[in-house]
């Protein structure tokens, strides 16, 4: 039986949430939520100085942002206002992170700019969207893991779920990697600020949540196959019902309905917490995210910008929904020839290197991907008994996950209603068909995490023709390329 209190969880009641989680079966598997306060409300940003005061008795604040102008619903400049509010009580240094070309990336180089100023600060206040938040979390954590500087984040758009978790998605040698970092101590989501964010940014947050219908099932699949040990139902139970409601309200979101935006803020924040509870991004990042990561990784070589994260994830989410639809309705476990499911390192290494070699001159991306994939391949060879049991008990697996997935046609229909792009060619930086095919076909070779695509690959189903068939099915939903 689902715990109704968990199903209707409120991200702003952290103590209440902690109590509910502690009462779940196997609660010891869930990691503590390392946050002090989450506020989701109209005017929440006005409490920024109070938030700092709850964290430090010091007087020096380092405010971090990028150079983009952000206005709230009244047309007031958000960063300047936050700075003025802090100035009343603190000595504030404002670091504006800039990069050639305008777009700021989550790189160790940008984190170093924050770290250089940390000795002079008692508290860091990040003002911005996902990139600034991830940089602040990473910079403070890796400067002092034991006692990272206090961190307040003023979230300026509902663009991703990563504000309320303890990891950062960083770009190392051009490869996207999710690394452990820390939670912000206080997260302020001012509905008067996020409500004025460009519609496509909030649609991006909605899109990040499309992963709710594929990532948790990837995680569960990995667990059943012995490829992941941490699976727990609570992180996804906490958001699934609210995500379902959000899908129903897709049209309202497109219309900018304030109540729906508030609901999006709550479930997006819970989705971030779900990753922290699992101590890994698996509850919210499966095959759909890897496809998206590959497209991001290729953007430099293609001389294009990086699309809104969640929007791109959602387009990939339709593809992943189609894969799950295939597995649950067309996959025939009795046809699997077990002894053909174990490619050797000698077989896989050249394939992985070849897939990623075009991304840079010094092969660092390809080597990075192989070093991670190698671990997954080694473990896959070790868990054959679990794989055999999975094939034998496939019907039980199907009924367990039946309620955790959504029909691809329904997801595409909701995304159309939300005005979310359903095609890669319709993203804010359109992605060409060749790159999309490359990303989908090779994404399982990028990282250590097991997803449905690894299963399809090891069972010999995954091929260029198979991917073409999936793209054809997507086309019928006015989605895909
Ligand atoms: Zn995401």
Image (cartoon, rainbow, N blue to C red):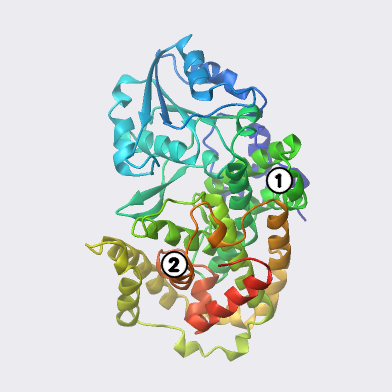
Does 339 sit left or right of 263 as displayed? left
Quarter where residue 13 is shown: top right
> Is any part of residue 407 visible from this angle?
no
Q: Disc 1 marks which residue?
A: 254
SS type, badge 1: helix
Q: Which mark is residue 106?
A: none
- Kindly identify the residue that appears in the image at 75 percent across and 43 percent down: 5
Residue at the far top: name it: 88
Q: Where is residue 70 in the image (x, y as percent from the top left)?
A: 52, 29
Residue at position x 53%, y 24% in the image? 78
**In the image, residue 149 lies at what x, y percent?**
39, 27
Q: Quick one: SS at disc 2?
A: helix
Which residue lies under the disc numbered 2?
Answer: 435
The first of marks 1 and 2 along the sequence is 1
> Does any atom of ligand 1 lie closer than 8 Å to the CB of label 1?
no
Q: Count neighbours of disc 1 (C-alpha within 10 A) and say few if under 14, some if 14 to 19, many if 20 or more.
A: many
Please tell me in which quadrant of the rendered image residue 143 appears.
top left
Are the residues at dot 1 and dot 2 in contact (C-beta closer than 8 Å)? no
Instruction: Work out whether 190 lies above or below 239.
Output: above
User: Which image quarter holds the C terminus?
Assistant: bottom right
- Rendering quarter of residue 193: top right
Q: Note whether residue 241 is visible.
A: yes
Vertical relation: 100 (above or below) 240: above
122 vs 172, nearest the viewer = 172
- From the viewer's perspective, is 414 left or right of 293? right
Residue 98 pos. (x, y %): 35, 34
x and y, in percent, of residue 291 in the image: 49, 63
Between 349 and 411, the residue placed more toward the observer is: 411
| Residue 54 left/right relative to 212 | left
């Amino acid at each position: 039986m689902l715990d109704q209190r968990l199903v209707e969880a409120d991200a702003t009641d952290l103590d209440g949430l902690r109590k509910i989680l502690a009462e779940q079966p196997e609660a010891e598997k869930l990691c503590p939520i390392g946050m002090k306060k989450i506020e989701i409300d109209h005017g929440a940003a006005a409490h920024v100085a109070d938030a700092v005061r709850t964290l430090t008795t010091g007087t020096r604040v380092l405010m971090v942002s990028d150079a983009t102008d952000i206005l709230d619903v009244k047309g007031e400049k958000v960063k300047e206002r936050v700075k003025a509010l802090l100035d009343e009580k603190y000595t504030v240094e404002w670091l504006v992170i800039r990069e050639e070309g305008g777009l700021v990336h989550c790189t160790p180089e940008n984190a170093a700019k924050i770290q250089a100023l940390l000795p002079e600060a008692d508290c860091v206040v990040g003002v911005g969207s996902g990139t600034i938040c991830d940089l602040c979390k990473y910079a403070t954590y890796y400067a002092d893991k034991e006692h990272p500087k206090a961190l307040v984040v003023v979230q300026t758009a509902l663009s991703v779920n990563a504000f309320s978790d303890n990891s950062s998605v960083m770009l190392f040698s051009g490869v996207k990697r999710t690394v452990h970092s820390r939670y912000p101590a206080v997260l302020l989501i001012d509905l008067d600020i996020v409500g004025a964010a460009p519609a496509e940014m909030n649609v991006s947050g909605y899109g990040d949540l499309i992963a709710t219908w594929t990532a948790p099932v990837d995680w569960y699949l990995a667990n059943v196959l012995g490829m992941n040990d941490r699976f727990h139902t609570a992180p996804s139970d906490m958001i699934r019902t609210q995500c379902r409601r959000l899908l129903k309200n897709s049209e309202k979101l497109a219309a900018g309905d304030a109540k729906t935006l508030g609901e999006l803020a709550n479930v997006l924040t819970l989705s971030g917490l779900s990753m922290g509870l699992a101590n890994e991004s698996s509850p919210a990042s499966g095959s759909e995210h890897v496809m998206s990561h590959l497209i991001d990784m290729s953007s430099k070589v293609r001389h294009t910008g990086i699309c809104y994260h969640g929007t791109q994830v959602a387009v990939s989410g339709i593809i992943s929904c189609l894969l799950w639809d295939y597995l649950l309705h067309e996959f025939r476990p009795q046809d699997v020839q077990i002894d053909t499911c174990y490619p050797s390192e000698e077989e896989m290494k050249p394939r992985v290197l070849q897939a990623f070699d075009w991304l840079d001159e010094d092969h660092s991306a390809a080597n990075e991907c192989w070093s991670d994939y190698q671990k997954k391949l080694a473990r896959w060879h070790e868990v054959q008994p679990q794989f055999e049991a999975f094939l034998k008990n496939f019907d039980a697996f199907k009924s367990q996950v039946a309620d955790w997935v959504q029909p691809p046609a329904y997801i595409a229909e909701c995304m159309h209603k939300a005005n979310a792009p359903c095609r890669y060619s319709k993203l804010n930086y359109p992605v060409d068909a060749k790159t999309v095919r490359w990303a989908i076909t090779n994404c399982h070779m990028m990282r250590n995490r097991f997803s449905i695509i690894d299963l399809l690959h090891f069972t010999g189903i995954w091929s260029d023709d198979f991917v073409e068939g999936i793209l054809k099915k997507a086309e019928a939903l006015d989605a895909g390329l």
